[in-house]
Image (spheres, helix red, strand yellow):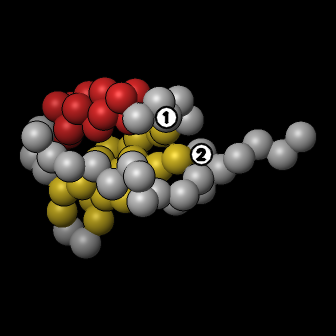
Amino acid sequence: MTRYPWKQLKRGYGFFIPCLDTEAVKRDGLQDALRHRLLYVKTATGIKDGRIGVLFFLLPPSRG
């Protein structure tokens, strides 16, 4: 299991996890986010620096 840096992450920022099985990492990361009670997480699969993986990011606080 990959460790996800949810505790160090501020809203509006994200992190990239390079991997081959993007669906498994996305599922694992979102489950870990729920354990931290984070409901404002988005994901995107893509390529960064020539490596395929998943970008996780916390949505910025809504302005209202």
Q: Mark 2 vs mark 1: which is more N-terminal?
A: 1
- Tag 1: amino acid: Leu
Residue furthest right as drawn: 64
Q: Are marks 2 and 1 in contact (CB under 8 Å)?
A: no
> Of residues 19 and 1, which is closer to you in this image?
1
Locate residue 5: give its quadrant.
Answer: bottom left
Q: Is residue 15 left or right of residue 26?
A: right
Please tell me the numbered disc located at residue 59: 2
Cα separation between marks 2 and 1: 10 Å
Q: Name the residue rendered at 41%, 41% in the picture.
A: 43
Considering the image in quadrants, where does the N terminus appear? top left
Give the labeled residue for mark 1.
38
- Tag 2: amino acid: Leu
Residue 5 seen from this side:
yes
Q: Is residue 11 left or right of residue 45?
A: right
Q: Name the residue rendered at 31%, 27% in the picture.
A: 31
> Of residues 22 and 29, which is closer to you in this image?
29
Task: Tell me the element at label 1.
Answer: loop
For mark 2, does the 10 Å Cα neighbourhood hold few (<14), some (14 to 19), or many (20 or more) residues?
some
> Of residues 25 and 10, which is closer to you in this image?
10
Q: Name the residue rendered at 19%, 56% in the picture.
A: 18
Locate residue 47: give its quadrant.
Answer: bottom left
Q: Position of residue 62 (x, y in %)?
A: 76, 43
